[in-house]
Image (spheres, helix red, strand yellow):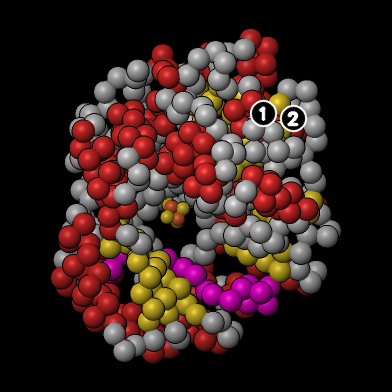
């Protein structure tokens, strides 16, 4: 594709957007998402932080990792903003949202395409400053450290405006260290407590919807923030920022533009919202579609109006999580879901004419054995006898800031072997097995347990072509081939 055609893809995308455009402002900030547009425009946090900055008077422009970075490289075109097609490298400040560990590869990629050295130590005064935040900062942000001039850990709602304003006052991000959740390189390989936003900011909401987003034509709004449950593998468990903070349906609905065709309700534990049924009723009665970011199986089982209304609001697949292979392991993870709840979900999917029941779970949870895998096979067969089922399988990856942060990753061979047994056991049934890669989970586990040296390894892996072998070598050279928190090193 030539440069003109690539620019036209941005023009076309902008033309397809609905909602409130970002106004121009004198002090320009690039809101950078290190994954492609489709994913970034489905991120509530990304859109919300951009909105807070725009409302404070900054000229916010969105930049995404190109869909096909190689095409942009060949065309010698740097990543450009959606708003004015300004090259990324000409902004004085980049505000980056990183969702999960493997997205750091996208960050390295997009900075390289822009001609900006990814590592802070290789940049000079002529380069933009890089401020990093996002969901990853709730667990282990240290692999981001080599790329950042400053970071905000946790909820950035209260902090991002003073962070950016201070930059335009002083030309530096040093003041971020004095803000809640603020980190600067002086802190080295140490984390700081995550920031908690004042409840007056809630609910976060998106301002632009588009058919080009993964969540097609959907305006996103936070129905609650945090979670009051205690699943031992999860960074959003109740010990994080005091649990669940609710938004009332009235408040939520008054913030949604009339013309938005679909409303996506977001929240780690949104299906635990005590007024969810009433809220869904009001949305569906208004003739709009509805989506929900997560659905607990026990809620579907105990409140049958939830699956009924979601189906009415256009939901096609009823998606819940079982999280582990057996009831014993679910109990071990302090997950309240039972077989009875999951069977009720399959019945609800059948009753309301869902295309499929989708069940997410993790393989390789510590303590898992053959008996657990056999139970998984037998139980999934039972679900599929009721309704066609998809089994979304992800290898267990231990995360910091959870009770399981020192747990072992099961190993690629172990996970692949068990996966093979699951496939074999479910052959000929109405179950579709959809696994994610054990190899990439291994990489994720290294990054989830690593420090700044793991971040530098990301850079070398990307430079070496990004294959699994390149990652393995880069992580090995950095001393993080096996999970070890000691291998944090020092910041360059
Ligand atoms: S897995 Fe879900 S229910 Fe459990 S603590 Fe995390 S957000 Fe809450």
**Badge 2: residue crowd in 10 Å (few <14, some 14–19, many ≥20):** many
Q: If you read the primary sequence from the N terminus, does the residue marked by circle 2 or circle 1 appear first?
A: 1
Residue at the (22%, 62%) spot, across then down? 415
Density class for disc 1 (Cα within 10 Å; few <14, some 14-19, many ≥20) is many
| Farthest residue, direction right | 258
Label 2 SS: strand
Question: Is label 2 in contact with label 1 (beta carbons under 8 Å)?
Answer: yes
Secondary structure category for the residue under label 1: strand
- Which quadrant of the structure image shows residue 436? bottom left
334 or 253: nearer the viewer = 253
Residue that mark 1 sits on: 29
Residue 34, percent across and down? 52, 42
What residue range appears in magenta?
309-326
Instruction: Examine the rendering and report whether any part of residue 253 can be seen.
Output: no
Provide residue 371's location: percent of width, then percent of height: 17, 72
Q: Is residue 71 left or right of residue 160?
A: left
Query: Eyeballing the image, is 111 above or below 6?
Result: above
- Residue hosting label 2: 59
x, y percentage for residue 3?
A: 64, 45
Quadrant where the C terminus sits is top left
Residue 204 in the image: x percent, y percent? 66, 44
Q: Residue at x 20, y 48 (%)?
A: 408
Nearer to the camera, 277 or 412: 412
- Judge whether 207 appears above or below 336 on screen: above
Numbered circles on residues, count: 2
């Amino acid at each position: 594709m030539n440069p003109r055609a690539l620019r036209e893809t941005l023009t076309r995308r902008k033309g397809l957007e609905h909602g409130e455009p970002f106004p121009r402002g004198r002090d320009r900030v690039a809101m950078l998402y290190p994954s492609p547009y489709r994913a970034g425009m489905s991120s509530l946090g990304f859109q919300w932080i951009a909105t807070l900055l725009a409302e404070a008077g900054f000229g916010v422009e969105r930049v995404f990792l190109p869909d096909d970075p190689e095409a942009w490289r060949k065309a010698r075109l740097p990543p450009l903003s959606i708003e004015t097609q300004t090259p990324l490298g000409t902004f004085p400040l980049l505000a980056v949202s990183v969702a999960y560990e493997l997205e750091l590869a996208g960050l390295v990629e997009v900075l390289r395409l822009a001609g900006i050295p990814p590592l802070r130590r290789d940049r000079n005064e002529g380069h933009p400053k890089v401020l990093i935040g996002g969901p990853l900062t709730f667990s282990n942000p240290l692999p981001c450290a080599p790329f950042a001039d400053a970071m905000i850990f946790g909820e950035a709602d209260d902090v991002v405006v003073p962070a950016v304003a201070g930059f335009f006052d002083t030309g530096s991000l040093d003041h971020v260290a004095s803000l809640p959740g603020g980190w600067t390189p002086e802190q080295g390989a140490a984390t700081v407590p995550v920031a908690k936003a004042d409840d007056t900011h809630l609910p976060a909401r998106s301002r632009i919807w588009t058919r080009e987003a993964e969540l097609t034509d959907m305006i996103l709004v936070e129905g609650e923030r945090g979670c009051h449950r205690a699943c031992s593998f999860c960074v959003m468990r109740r010990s994080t920022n005091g649990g669940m903070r609710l938004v009332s349906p009235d408040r939520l609905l008054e913030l949604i533009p009339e013309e938005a065709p679909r409303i996506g309700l977001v929240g780690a534990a949104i299906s635990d919202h005590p007024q969810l049924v009433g809220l869904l009723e009001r949305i569906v009665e208004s003739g709009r579609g509805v989506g929900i970011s997560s659905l607990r199986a026990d809620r579907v089982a105990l409140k049958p109006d939830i699956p009924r209304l979601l189906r009415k609001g256009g939901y096609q697949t009823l998606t819940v999580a079982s999280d582990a292979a057996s009831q014993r392991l679910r109990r071990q993870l302090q997950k309240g879901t039972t077989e009875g709840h999951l069977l009720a979900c399959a019945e609800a999917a059948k009753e309301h004419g869902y295309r499929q029941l989708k069940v997410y779970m993790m393989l390789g949870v510590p303590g898992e054995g053959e008996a657990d895998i056999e139970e998984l096979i037998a139980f999934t067969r039972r679900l599929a006898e009721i309704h066609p089922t998809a089994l979304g399988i992800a290898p267990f990856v231990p995360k910091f800031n959870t009770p399981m942060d020192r747990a072992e990753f099961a190993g690629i061979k172990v996970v692949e072997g068990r996966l093979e047994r699951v496939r074999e056991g479910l052959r000929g049934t109405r179950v579709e097995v959809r696994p994610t890669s054990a190899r990439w989970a291994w990489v994720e586990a290294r990054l989830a347990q690593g420090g700044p040296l793991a971040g530098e390894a990301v850079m070398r892996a990307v430079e070496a072509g990004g294959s699994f072998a390149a990652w393995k070598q880069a992580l090995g050279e950095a001393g993080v081939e096996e999970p070890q928190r000691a291998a944090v090193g020092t910041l360059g």
